[in-house]
Amino acid sequence: MFLMLGFSILTGGGFLVSNFEFAMCYLGLVFEFLALVGNWDRHRRRRRSQSHPDSVAPAVV
């Protein structure tokens, strides 16, 4: 978001209007990549916790 605002300032405010669809596609790709990394990390952590169940402390609220 801040990167898009920075680009709009550099290009005189025309970036957000003319390249709005490109920005949306770019943000979609970034979120897709973050979701893939998050799922992989969660999957890796889940496998590790299954192989070592004693190392995971129960959550006490």
Image (cartoon, helix red, strand yellow):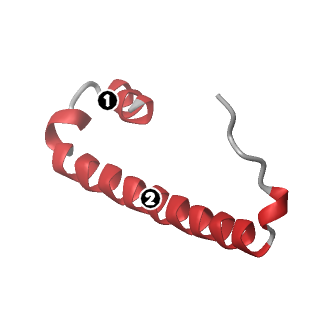
- Location of residue 34 in the rendering, given as x and y in whole percent from the top left corner: 48, 56
Q: Is residue 43 above or below residue 15?
A: below
Asked whether, in this view, residue 5 is left or right of residue 42, the answer is left
- Location of residue 44 in the rendering, given as x and y in whole percent from the top left corner: 65, 70
Asked whether, in this view, residue 22 is left or right of residue 57, the answer is left
Identify the residue at image location x=58%, y=62%: 42
Tag shown at residue 35: 2
Give the alpha-carbon distance from disc 2 to disc 1, as whole Å: 27 Å
Identify the residue at image location x=78%, y=48%: 57
Callout 1 secondary element:
helix
Q: Amino acid at mark 1?
A: Ser
Q: Is residue 22 above or below residue 2?
A: below
- Location of residue 14 in the rendering, given as x and y in whole percent from the top left corner: 21, 32
Point out the image quarter for the N terminus.
top left
Q: Amino acid at mark 2?
A: Ala
Q: Which of 33 and 49 lies nearest the eye of the viewer?
A: 49
Residue 43 falls in which quadrant of the image?
Answer: bottom right
**Nearer the N terminus, badge 2 or badge 1?**
1
Residue density around tag 2, few if under 14, some if 14–19, many if 20 or more, within 10 Å: few
Callout 2 secondary element:
helix
Asked whether, in this view, residue 11 is left or right of residue 21, the answer is right
Q: How many marks?
A: 2
Mark 1, residue position = 8
Point out the image quarter for the C terminus.
top right
Q: Are marks 2 and 1 in contact (CB under 8 Å)?
A: no
